[in-house]
Amino acid sequence: MALTAAAVQAAPPSVLPELMSALGIDPSVLGDTPMPSTHANPPSAKLLIAHAEAERATLTAPTITPAQAALAEAEQRVTATDADAEEARKAVNRLRARLRKAKKAAAEGTGAESDVAVKQKDVDDAKQAYLDAQRRQCEAREDVAAAKFGLHEDMATDAERDAYFASLSDDEIDTITRALNRRAAPAAEQALTEGGQPAEAGTPRDTGVYNAGTIAM
C-alpha cells in the first residue's frame, strides 16, 4: 500500500507498533530492524489506521470490467423506464377521470364542450406518452440482452465463447441484433447523409436480376 507507506514515513516512528497491530502485520516483517520504541504518551495511529484500511479495501475490491459496467448501466435503465411507464399509466388514468368529469358537466349544462375537447386531447397525448414509455421499456430490456451478450468479452477462452454463442436461441439473437442495430443507427444515418447513397460507381445497376432479401448485419 504505497500511500499508507508514504504516510507512515511522514509520521512519528512511535505510531508504527499500534498501526501494525491494528492491521495484523507480523513484526517479523521488519527483519533485523528493531521496532521503534514508544514513549509514555505516543501519538494515536487511529487516523493512519483508517487511511490504511481504506486503501486496503480499494486495492482488494473486485475489478469491474467495461462489459460488467455496461450491463449494470443497462439494468439501471430498465428500472428507470419501468418507473416512467408506471407514472405514464397513472397519468392516463388521472386524465381519463378528468375527461369523464368534463363530459358529465357538459351533459348537465354546467360545463363547456370546448373543455371536453381539451381534456380529450390531454388523454390522447397521455396515451401516446404511455405507448412511448412502453416502447422504451421494451428497448431497455433488449439493451440488457445486448449487454449480457457483451460479457463474452470477459470469457477466458475461445472455446468458452464459442459454447456461449452456440447456446443462443434464435429469439435471443434477434433481440440482441435489434439492440445493436438501434445502437448503431445514429452513426449509420450520419454516414449515409454525409456520404450519399451507396451505389455502384459508373455502371447502371440492373436490379432485375436480384431477388429481394434480408441480410443480418
Image (tube, rainbow, N blue to C red):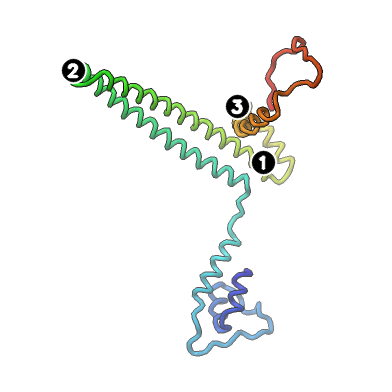
Q: Which residue is mark 1?
A: 152
Q: Residue at x 70, y 29 (%)?
A: 195
Count neighbours of disc 1 (C-alpha within 10 A) and say few if under 14, some if 14 to 19, many if 20 or more.
Answer: some
Q: Residue at x 62, y 74 (%)?
A: 6
Q: Which amino acid lies under the numbered mark 3 shown in the image of this protein?
A: Asp
Question: Gap between marks 3 and 2, in whole Å?
Answer: 56 Å
Q: Which mark is residue 171?
A: 3
Question: Which label's residue is closer to the chain start, 1 or 3?
Answer: 1
Question: Mark 3 or 2, which is nearer the eye?
Answer: 2
Q: Amino acid at mark 2?
A: Gly
* Residue denoted by label 2: 109
**Residue 176 vs residue 172, the one in the foreground:** 176
Label 1 SS: helix
* Secondary-structure class at tag 2: loop
**Place of residue 124 in the rendered image (x, y in percent of width and height, measured from the top left):** 38, 23
Asked whether 217 or 101 is in front, the reply is 101
Question: On the rendered image, what quadrant is the C terminus found in?
Answer: top right
Q: Residue at x 59, y 85 (%)?
A: 36
